[in-house]
Image: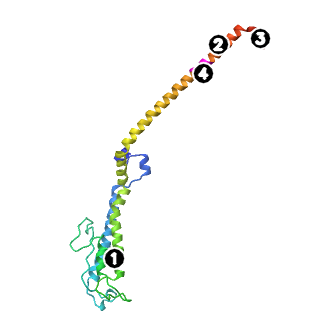
Amino acid sequence: MDQWVENPEAQSAFRDLLPCVDNATVQTSLNVSSRVTFGLVQVVDQYITTIANQDLTVEAGPLYHNQTGPLVPLLCSPFDSNLTRRSCAPGEVDFNHAGEEWKKYVCQVSAESICTTVGRLTPNAYNQMMSAVNTSSQINSFGPFLADLVDCTTVRNTFRDISKTYCPGLRQNSFRTYIGMVIVSTAMLFSQIFWLFYVRERRHRIRYKKTISMTEYPLVGKGRR
């Protein structure tokens, strides 16, 4: 694991199991996810600026829903037009607080989707805006994580933690197990050697006894034949 962490591109079994993409591909993926997030925020803010926060009249047609009351705050984009990280400007709401804040500007509507109470967002418009917010938030949150996953940064960090936290104890316990196996193997080896000596000595004793018997009682032996 340590060798793979230091050089993931080296030919190894880990490389076959964990095919990591190159950094250029990862950066391209991050740029695409950042651009999608930026584009969704721009769509929501354009709706707020050109429709929700405008005091339109009936002549505006489908854009009119009797918008009244305080202006709806804009959604904060985590990126600027150059896809560089930015901080929220005063008056903007981030992904985490947009839903709670925008609820204050939702009006009650008639059957024709016209506001009958003070407010600048119809329930339908609010739901569509929140869909865009949730999508943007998920892309913004999981984009870097997925990038770290495909270029094996997450796996490398995990392996590094395993090697640092668990491998020292594993090496120590493995060494103890190895020593134990060596002792058991050595004991078995000596047991086999002693058994061979025992068997050989026993055979010698049996042969010696037979020889003594034949020497002392030669006729008995012939009679038995």
| Distance Cα–Cα, label 3 vs label 2 | 19 Å
Q: Secondary structure at mark 1?
A: helix
Question: What residue did someone put label 3 on?
Answer: 222
- Helix, strand or loop status at disc 3: helix
**Residue mark closest to the camera, 1 vs 4:** 4
Q: Which residue is mark 1?
A: 129
Tags 2 and 4 touching, CB below 8 Å = no
Q: At 37% across and 47% down in the image, what residue appears?
A: 162
Please say if 150 is above or below 87: above
The reply to whether dot 1 and dot 4 touch (C-beta < 8 Å) is no
Binning the other alpha carbons within 10 Å of mark 4 as few (below 14), some (14 to 19) or many (20 upward) gives few
Task: Tell whether position 184 is magenta.
Answer: no
Quadrant into which the N terminus falls: top left
Figure label count: 4
Q: In terms of sequence position, does the residue under pointer 3 or pointer 4 come before the other?
A: 4
Which residue is denoted by mark 2 in the rendering?
A: 208
Q: Which residues are magenta?
A: 197-202
